Amino acid sequence: MVKKRDPAAIAEEALGVKAGRAAKKVPFAFVLDELEVLAPTTRPMFGCTAIYVGPRIVLVLRDGRGTADDGVWIATTAEHHASLRKELPSIRSITVFGPGESGWQVIPAAAESFEEEVLWACELVRRADPRVGKVPKPKRRKSAPA
């Protein structure tokens, strides 16, 4: 016997949204416009919007929480922080994962130079600057029950 699927569930799957709900607005959408030539993809991540170029996560867009970590997160490593800070003076480690240095740097939405710095970060992504972007570790598969 074939199980009938609910039409709303089919629509949700096809559109990637819950039936009856509008798609979540992407914060700082101008970032996607700036990266359009690279055909970026987006994925939800921790209630934010992650931007991928190929297999690399490059940026995360976060807004609407009213915290210091709202802004554009840059996927990088600690070895690149100093050189990136020369070009993006407002960046700092995100605090949402706890105190201390983080691989994730944020251009805070509250920074006076926010838009200019984000546009420069987008330029670094377009240039495939090796300081920006990480290939995420593969997800572990759940082992089959014994």
Image (cartoon, grey):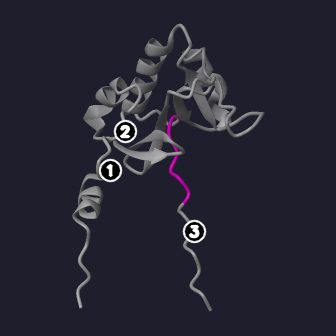
Q: Residue at x 50, y 46 (%)?
A: 45
The residue that mark 2 highlights is 24
In the picture shown, does residue 117 fall above or below 29? Answer: above
- Earlier residue among tags 3 and 1: 1
* Residue 5 in picture, x, y percent from top left: 25, 72
Q: Residue at x 29, y 52 (%)?
A: 19
Residue range (magenta):
131-137
In the picture shown, does residue 46 fall above or below 9? Answer: above
Asked if disc 1 and disc 2 are in contact, CB closer than 8 Å, the reply is yes
* Residue 69 in picture, x, y percent from top left: 61, 27
Query: Whole-Å distance between the Cαs marked 1 and 2?
Result: 8 Å
Q: Which mark is drawn over residue 140?
A: 3
Query: Whole-Å distance between the Cαs marked 3 and 1?
Result: 26 Å
Classify 10 Å Cα crowding around label 3: few (below 14), some (14-19), many (20 and above): few
In the picture shown, does residue 134 fall above or below 7? Answer: above
Tag 2: residue type? Answer: Lys
Q: Is residue 132 magenta?
A: yes
Q: Is residue 71 magenta?
A: no
Asked if disc 3 and disc 1 are in contact, CB closer than 8 Å, the reply is no
Query: Whole-Å distance between the Cαs marked 2 and 3?
Result: 28 Å
Classify 10 Å Cα crowding around label 1: few (below 14), some (14-19), many (20 and above): some
Q: Secondary structure at mark 2?
A: loop
Q: Report the number of discs.
A: 3
The residue that mark 1 highlights is 17
Q: Residue at x 32, y 44 (%)?
A: 21
